[in-house]
Image (cartoon, rainbow, N blue to C red):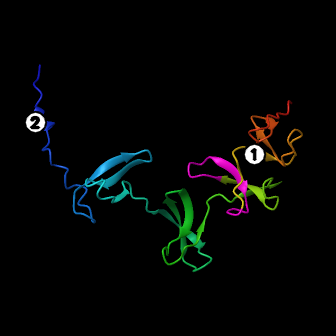
Amino acid sequence: MSKIDHSLFSAHEHALEHALGECPECGKPLQIRNSKAGPFVGCTGYPDCHFSKPLHDTQTTVLKVMDGSHCPQCDSPMALKKGRYGMFIGCTRFPDCHHIEPIKQQEDTKVTCPKCRKGHLIERTNKYGKRFFSCNDYPKCRYVLNFPPVQAQCPECGWGVLIDKKGQKQCPQPTCGYKEVT
């Protein structure tokens, strides 16, 4: 049987002490800390020093410059980019030009928003690719549905829209239990 060299696994106790640097506010070493939102870099002088910064850099990365595309604001080439909220198309002259476009155009369902009664519910996708439906009058109206809307009034509570959930029409209001049996 071979013998394991344990010196390969031992590290000096202060080997990573300066890996994250020093706190710009108090000069004490920085360390990786945890919170309910996830890991972050924080000062070892907490609670006297409250310095913290994100563990991961959330900058935008250019994946590919799109040939033949031009920014409508500055006429520079457009690029496929990945940011903290997912992938999008943006101007290559950022930060001088802030023009961005979604990869997938939002589809109007032509269903009137039941909350504000002014806008329409449009299909969108979140940063994880999951689709949802929200009012196009955002941020004035923040109505959101997770299932496709159906332009019909609920016969029980009178809410202005139903949803199509698993092939069944039902009321999206949590207090109303209406389901249309097909």
Where does the image place residue 56, in percent across and percent down from the top left? 38, 54
- Residue numbers of the magenta segment: 125-140
Number of numbered discs overlaid on the protein picture: 2
- In the rendered image, the residue lying farthest to the front is 48
Q: Outermost residue toward the right? A: 155
Q: Quadrant of the N terminus?
A: top left
Residue 119 x/y as whole percent: 79, 61
Residue farthest to the top? 1
6, 135: nearer the viewer: 135
Residue ID for mark 1: 148
Helix, strand, or loop for circle 1? loop
Q: Tell me the residue at 51%/62% (across/down).
A: 81
User: Residue 175 at x, y = what percent?
Assistant: 76, 38
Kind of residue at badge 2:
Ser
Query: Disc 2 marks which residue?
Result: 7
Q: Is residue 26 above or below residue 16?
A: below
Q: Amino acid at mark 1?
A: Pro
